[in-house]
Amino acid sequence: MNKLHTLAIATTLSVFTFGAQAADNFAGLTWGKSTVNIDRSSTLKQNMPGANRFDDTIKNSGTWGIRAGQMTDEARYYATYENVSDDYGSSLKLRQQNLFGSYDMFLPVGDTTRLFGGASAGLTKLENESSGYRRDSDIGYLVGLQAGVLQDVGKNTSIEAGYRYLRSNAGTEVAERGVGKVGSIDLHSSKQAYLGVNYKF
């Protein structure tokens, strides 16, 4: 968690020192659906043959997030925390927590509507909480791209719809209780479609 805390402080400082031009502070909430792509080690493929059920754990799973940053008419900087967890049957369960900073540029398509696109970088924490297995977690990097549409619905409020694709290198061991390690998994990538609401202050 020290890496997460360090990133949170660094990102917050960079976000809130964004003041070269007039900018509004904003905070927001997001809700969406995430799907992850999990790679299995060769040992795990031998010990757990067949379909990759770890790919089915976080699959179109509900994901919530909170964010804060600064916004101008041309762009925005912000920090985001996200959390998603889900399971496959009653045996496999994974949790992913993301903490990252993002930069988006705006393209106006009307008086109150803007398209946006940008990049994100930060950290992700992958936790293996599967029943019958030892709990394990790992923190890795996170990089990706996002795009969507932002719609003003009032002087200080906006809503948005977006899509995000992220790559990561976090991984955990898979060890059965009383048996020992049977392999490992790596978080290769994740994709997310989401809706958000933002408030400027």
Image (cartoon, rainbow, N blue to C red):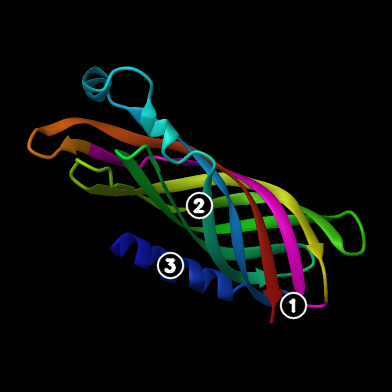
Q: In this rendering, which labeled residue sits more in front, label 2 or label 1?
A: 2
Q: In this orientation, which residue lies closer to the viewer: 196 or 115?
A: 196
| Residue under numbered circle 2 | 121
Kindly report the distance in space between the C-alpha atoms of the residues bearing marks 3 and 2: 12 Å
Marks 3 and 1, Cα distance to the nearest angstrom?
24 Å
Q: Secondary structure at mark 1?
A: loop
Q: Is residue 17 left or right of residue 156?
A: left
Quarter of the image for residue 98 reads bottom left
- Mark 3 crowdedness (10 Å alpha carbons): few <14, some 14-19, many ≥20: some
Residue type indicated by callout 2: Ala
Badge 3 vs badge 2, beta-carbon distance below 8 Å: no
In the picture, the quarter occupied by the C terminus is: bottom right
Crowd class of label 1 (few under 14; some 14 to 19; many from 20; radius 10 Å): few
Sequence-first disc among 3 and 2: 3
* Sequence-wise first label, 2 or 1: 1
Q: Residue furthest bottom?
A: 201
The answer for how far apart the CA atoms under marks 2 and 1 are is 25 Å
- Quadrant location of the N terminus? bottom left
> Which residue lies at the image location 53% right of the left edge and 61% below the top edge?
65
Question: Which comes sooner in the sequence, label 3 or label 1?
Answer: 3
Identity of the residue drawn at 59% across and 57% down:
31
**Residue behind mark 3:** 8
Q: Amino acid at mark 1?
A: Ala
Residue 114: give x, y in percent of width and height. 82, 57
Q: Nearer the viewer, mark 3 or mark 1?
A: 3
Q: Which residues are magenta?
A: 155-173
Element class at badge 2: strand
Secondary structure category for the residue under label 3:
helix
Which residue in the protein does label 1 denote?
A: 22
- Amino acid type at image mark 3: Ala
